[in-house]
Amino acid sequence: MAKDVNQFAVPDQLREACARNAPLELHRSTEKGTEPVARGRLLAIKDDRLYIEKPQAIGKDIDLGVGREFRAFFIIGELLLYFETTIVDPVCVLKLNKEKIIHGVVLAAPSRLQQGQRREFFRTSLACQAPISVHLHETNPAHPTHCPINARRFEGQIVDASGGGLGIVLEEKPRRLQVNGQYFATFQLPDVADELVFLVEARQLRPIRDETAVRIGFMFVPWPSPFDLTRKIEPLIRYLTMVQRSLKRSA
């Protein structure tokens, strides 16, 4: 899955990532490998301590107790790097300047980095790309893969995506849209002939723009099977890889 990259300077790459305030994703181990559970920006590294903004969880609370173990991923250049870490202090306050104070978390800085091969699960912002509209169709709660004729439908815009899900903005909060509700999401990618259709589950909902709009984090649901999801997601992964390379060139 991964290869050791001790030949890369440590902590120089972390220092560069902190200087760029690069996103850091915290993953936890499961029987199937690792899955992303929270995300925050790298802020500073000092001695054996790594400071990040308070991680935002996707749709649920996250255990940030002292000693909690995570695998942390970040991208620098063309590399996806990760390291094993633990929570040193779940609460810290960083003063970035005279006016800006950020609440964060202290992690144990790694003694080595490894190169990962799960770049497709790293969330990519699409804010600077051509807008991608998405149609959401409510499912039947008793039979999530059925689409009732009278189901509620919504339209929004994809603002970020990964191999694990979509971040979608709706211009107003839909009535009765619930976290953990399932929907069919249909959208068209640039230069892809066929529409993509995924079964998704709402995991996080928060108001934005002074509560005039809402951002919803959706997780892909393996439908009609894990194999089919892996196959259907390939065009999205290719598109996100292209966006990542474009962003790197313009940086």
Image: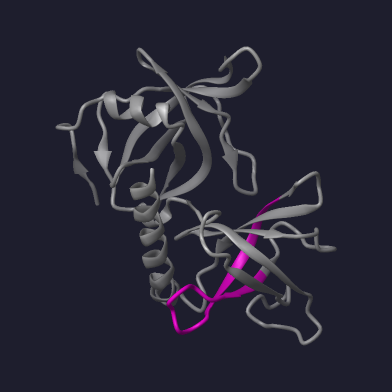
Tell which of 70 and 245 is nearer to you: 245
Residue at 57% across / 34% down in the picture? 63
Is residue 129 at all visible to an observer of this figure? yes
Q: Is 32 rendered above or below residue 131?
A: above
Residue, far bottom: 149
Q: Position of residue 55 (x, y in %)?
A: 56, 34
Quarter of the rendering occupied by the C terminus: top left
Q: Main secondary structure of the magenta part?
A: strand
Please say whether residue 188 is one of the residues in the magenta stretch: yes
Please say whether residue 180 is one of the residues in the magenta stretch: no
Residue at 83% across / 63% down in the picture? 176
Residue, far right: 175
Find residue 221 and report its image quarter. Answer: bottom right
Marks counted in the figure total 0
Q: Position of residue 85 (x, y in %)?
A: 39, 29
Tell which of 190 and 206 is nearer to you: 190
Is residue 230 at all visible to an observer of this figure? no
Colour treatment of the image: one colour
Magenta residues (range): 183-205
Residue at 71% across / 56% down in the picture? 179
User: Does 180 sit left or right of 212 as displayed?
Assistant: left
Q: Is 66 rendered above or below residue 177?
A: above
Q: Position of residue 61 (x, y in %)?
A: 64, 40
Residue, far front: 250
Q: Is 227 rendered above or below residue 214?
A: below
Q: Position of residue 62 (x, y in %)?
A: 59, 38
Find residue 152 and report its image quarter. Answer: bottom right
